[in-house]
Image: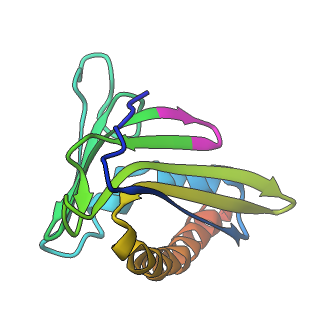
Amino acid sequence: MIKQPQPPGFQDHVYEFSFVIEAGEEHIWQWLNDTRTFTDTQVWPWKVEFYSPDAKRIPNGFHEKVLTNHFGPFINLAGELVKIDHNYRDLQYFYGSYAISFRWIRPYRLEFRTEPKGDSTEVQCTLRSYVKPFIAGFWTRSQKMFWGRFKGWSRRSIRKIAKLSLVPS
């Protein structure tokens, strides 16, 4: 596990949310663990990359030990996928990752979990960051807006995947 140090003058900030999608866990993870979900939908000048440090042993993509970076104006979120199993993914960001400014916001961990709820699945997400106290409220509001859009986007995309898998071949 990567443990990024908490810088002096920063506070721990945890943003959590969950939502339910009318689809099975396998469809959620099919979408969440497809690199194209994140690479093909980025608006220029932002970009997401994945890099296997050992391509002979670890496929590039959503696999443990693969490195990833989401970068562009005002963000550099470089990290490592440290744990992936059937209902959990843990991406830990390296020291030096930041949003807006390295002086103000330093994300250090992004976790996704799923839990079956009958014919639906609850998706839970936790983003942990170190933030300067004066910007914590702004960071919370920004996360509500960003992840609010993520919820709608994921619901639409995953419903398409679920419908496609129901069509007989």
Residue 31 in the image, given as x and y percentages of width and height: 50, 57
First to last magenta residue range: 83-88
Magenta segment includes 84:
yes
| Furthest-front residue in this view | 9
Query: Can the viewer see residue 169?
Result: no
Q: Nearer the viewer, residue 114 or 33?
A: 114
Q: Nearer the viewer, residue 146 or 151?
A: 146
Q: Quadrant of the C terminus?
A: bottom right
Q: Residue at x 19, y 58 (%)?
A: 102
Q: Is residue 109 above or below residue 140?
A: above
Q: Nearer the viewer, residue 150 or 17?
A: 17
Tell me which colouring the rendered structure shows. rainbow
Is 132 positioned to the left or the right of 119 in the image? Answer: left
Is 125 positioned to the left or the right of 82 in the image? Answer: right
Q: Nearer the viewer, residue 64 or 167?
A: 64
| Furthest-top residue in this view | 57
Q: Is residue 107 above or below residue 86?
A: below
Q: Quadrant of the N terminus?
A: top left
Specify the principal SS of the magenta part.
Answer: strand
Q: Is residue 163 above or below residue 152?
A: above
Is 123 positioned to the left or the right of 49 in the image? Answer: right
Is 127 positioned to the left or the right of 41 in the image? Answer: right
Residue 21 in the image, given as x and y percentages of width and height: 69, 69
Q: Residue at x 23, y 23 (%)?
A: 55
Query: Can the viewer see residue 116?
Result: yes
Residue 121, image quadrant: bottom right
Magenta segment includes 58:
no
Q: Residue at x 35, y 38 (%)?
A: 4
Q: Residue at x 39, y 37 (%)?
A: 81
Residue 10 in the image, given as x and y percentages of width and height: 35, 56
Residue 68 in the image, given as x and y percentages of width and height: 27, 44
Q: How many marks?
A: 0
